[in-house]
Image (cartoon, rainbow, N blue to C red):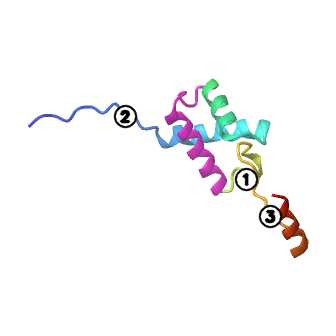
């Protein structure tokens, strides 16, 4: 029977994850509101995560946990990449018909 190959995956301990989340919280608290990408790059500079898709996912997951458990206020993060959704509204049928005719 062949031994299984080492996968190379090293998981962070609970203490390491807690420390990373505390430092990520501190990053956001200092400069809020921030985007996830801004937090990621600050975390990379501070050697909290590697500069990779995997590192970005760690930051994203940590921010989600911190928001959902009430540690990080939702308004401390912003998403500037998306246009806000606004419903199409008119004052009445006449305005709607005029808009339709113009467009």
Check the picture and name the quadrant holding the N terminus: top left
- Regarding residue 92, the answer to whether it shows in the image is no
Residue 93 in view: yes
Task: Measure the alpha-carbon separation of dots 3 and 1.
Answer: 27 Å
What percent of the width, then of the height, locates residue 91?
91, 71
CA gap, disc 1 to disc 2?
32 Å
User: Is 5 covered by the magenta stretch?
Assistant: no
The single residue placed furthest to the front in the displayed view is: 101
**Which of the pair 16/50 is nearer the observer?**
50
Magenta extent: 46-69
Residue 40 vertical placement versus 67 (above, below)? above
> Which residue lies under the disc numbered 2?
9
Q: Select label 3 or label 2 by which is in front.
A: 3
Q: Residue at x 59, y 51 (%)?
A: 65
Towards the viewer: 90 or 16? 90
**Residue ranking furthest to the bottom:** 93
Q: Nearer the viewer, residue 37 or 3?
A: 37
Q: Quadrant of residue 5?
A: top left
Secondary structure beneath label 3 = loop
Task: Work out whether 13 lies above or below 47.
Answer: below
Considering only vertical position in the picture, is 38 above or below 99? above
Q: Position of residue 70 (x, y in %)?
A: 68, 56
Dividing the image into 4 quarters, which one contains the C terminus?
A: bottom right
Residue bearing mark 1: 74
User: Which badge, 3 or 1, is on the more N-terminal residue?
Assistant: 1
Number of the label disc, if any, that sits on residue 88: 3
Q: Is residue 63 left or right of residue 77?
A: left
> Residue, x 49% and y 35% (percent of image)?
54
């Amino acid at each position: 029977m062949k031994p299984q190959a080492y996968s190379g995956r090293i998981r962070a301990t609970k203490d390491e994850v807690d420390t990373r989340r505390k430092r990520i919280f501190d990053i956001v608290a200092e400069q809020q509101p921030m985007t996830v990408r801004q937090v990621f790059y600050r975390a990379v500079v501070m050697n909290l995560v590697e500069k990779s898709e995997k590192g970005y996912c760690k930051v994203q997951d940590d921010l989600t946990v911190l928001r959902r458990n009430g540690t990080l206020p939702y308004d401390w993060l912003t998403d500037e990449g998306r246009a806000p959704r606004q419903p199409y509204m008119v004052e009445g049928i006449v305005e709607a018909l005029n808009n339709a005719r113009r467009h």
